[in-house]
Image (tube, helix red, strand yellow):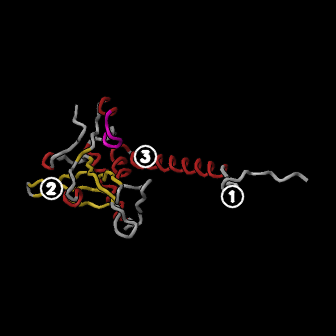
Amino acid sequence: FMPLSNTCDSSELKGGEVLYVWRSAGVVLYRHFGVCVVKKVRGVKRVSVIHVQDNRSGGEFLVETNLEEFTLGATLKKVCTSPTLPELMLCVSGTHIQSKYTPVQVMKRAKQELAKSRKQKGNTKYNLIFNNCETFTTFCLTGQRSSAQSRHLHHVWKFSQSISTKLASIRAKKKPQLRAPGMLAVKAPKK
């Protein structure tokens, strides 16, 4: 049974593992995901991460950076890709995903997506719901693009919309009576 924290040491990383760190945008906390790439260069282990960056203001969609640039000082964690049933029941959504591919295949898929993104020269655009770091890593693991964080955000948005609609409906039914304080409302006689 793997501990649910999923915290890992950079010396233990293997190519094809999906990594994440907690980040914040204002008051919102979110998980930023990437695929670990390990290469041996002259006998030295080199670790990098392929991940999505928000390129709405220009630049590349997928990038390969060193571990420090990916973590930005945050605690590094890895996604469990072969979770047990108890882990699935207790896990934070998106941190335990059953992989369809081996780690080597996951790393290869990430490199293929990076090459495709570079050919498109920034034409692939970031989208908070449909094209983000989690949809990229989930695609590398399963062949399907999905994001547990985005689904959660969508449900919260739909819930807040339904509350707003209900409140507007309640306000519309409670039209204010036009009368001075202490006066009784009197109906006008029918003609």
Q: Is residue 115 visible?
A: no
Viewer-side label of 1, 2: 1
- The residues bearing labels 3 and 1 have C-alpha atoms spaced at a distance of 48 Å
Q: Mark 2 or mark 3: which comes first in sequence?
A: 2
Q: Secondary structure at mark 3?
A: helix
Identified at 25% across, 49% down, the residue is 19
Q: Secondary structure at mark 2?
A: strand
Q: 142 or 129: which is nearer to us?
A: 129
Question: Is 31 displayed left or right of 167 in the figure?
Answer: left
Q: Position of residue 190 (x, y in %)?
A: 88, 51
Q: Position of residue 55 (x, y in %)?
A: 37, 65
In reply to whether residue 92 is colored magenta, the answer given is yes
- Identify residue for label 2: 46
- The region drawn magenta spans 90-96
Farthest-out residue, right: 191
Q: 6 or 159: which is nearer to us?
A: 159
Identified at 41% across, 47% down, the residue is 146
Q: Which mark is residue 152?
A: 3
- The residues bearing labels 1 and 2 have C-alpha atoms spaced at a distance of 79 Å
Farthest-out residue, bottom: 58
Q: Is residue 183 visible?
A: yes
- What is the three-letter code of the residue carrying label 2? Arg
Question: Is 1 displayed left or right of 123 in the figure?
Answer: left
- Identify residue for label 1: 180
